[in-house]
Amino acid sequence: MNNFNQFNIIKEILQFEYENKMISKGNNFPKLNINEYNLKYICILLHNKIEISEISRYFGWSQKELSDRLELLLKEELIIKKQNEYIPYLMVISLEEGKKLNDIANIIKDDYINIFEENHKSIHYSYNNSVYLNEISFEEYFIWWYHLLYSRVTDLLIEAHIIDIPNTGNFSYIVS
């Protein structure tokens, strides 16, 4: 494909707004700001199967500038190198892909809602008897309760070797 076509494809991909999100365990925080040096866009373009040489050409980077950026992403485990190819090691979720994922969620949504409705009284009782009663709303308490619940489920999945935590301790993703 010629440079003009690649340039237009990249321009089309990058026309959307993208947000960075992260799920972290414990005191793990990213060591770099993915919004700097177009690092986020490297991940997005790799996800869209754009070759690294085309990404470099699009941004007008020297080999050193490209290597520095790739090294930052590799250290943070946001990309990996497999057989001389760089691959995003995080989810890049487009609107279209997000709709499909919303459909790996509607399958169990009703089950979750039923569980929360069945346990609403006990969760509310716990809130009313907690030290947080006068500090936060029930809704905030419930969100934290839910966060602790899915954190515990995550720990159980890790213990069962169903999921692995990256060395950084962070699961990052980019949403369009």
Image (spheres, rainbow, N blue to C red):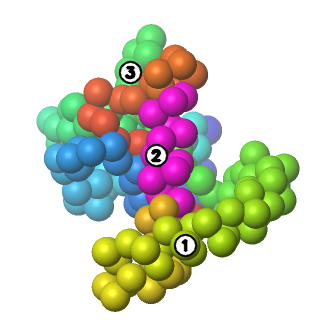
Residue designated by label 3: 81
Residue 18 image point, x, y percent: 48, 65
Answer with mark 2 or mark 3, whichever residue precedes in sequence: 3
Spatial CA distance of label 3 from label 1 is 51 Å
Describe the element under mark 3 as helix, strand or loop: strand
In-front residue for pair 80/151: 151
Residue designated by label 1: 125
The residue most toward the top is 83
Position of residue 155 relative to residue 84, above or below, is below
Residue designated by label 2: 151
In-front residue for pair 62/105: 105
The residue positioned 39% from the left and 82% from the top of the image is 133
Would you say 147 lies left or right of 101 here? Answer: left
Answer with mark 2 or mark 1, whichever residue precedes in sequence: 1
Boundaries of the magenta span: 146-157
In-front residue for pair 101/10: 101
Answer with mark 3 or mark 1, whichever residue precedes in sequence: 3
Describe the element under mark 2 as helix, strand or loop: helix
Q: Is residue 136 magenta?
A: no
Q: Residues within 10 Å of mark 1 (few under 14, many from 20)?
A: few
**Type of amino acid under label 3:** Lys
| Quadrant of the drawing holding the C terminus | bottom right
Residue 161 image point, x, y percent: 52, 17
The residue positioned 54% from the left and 39% from the top of the image is 153
Q: Residues within 10 Å of mark 3 (few under 14, many from 20)?
A: few
Would you say 108 lies left or right of 166 here? Answer: right
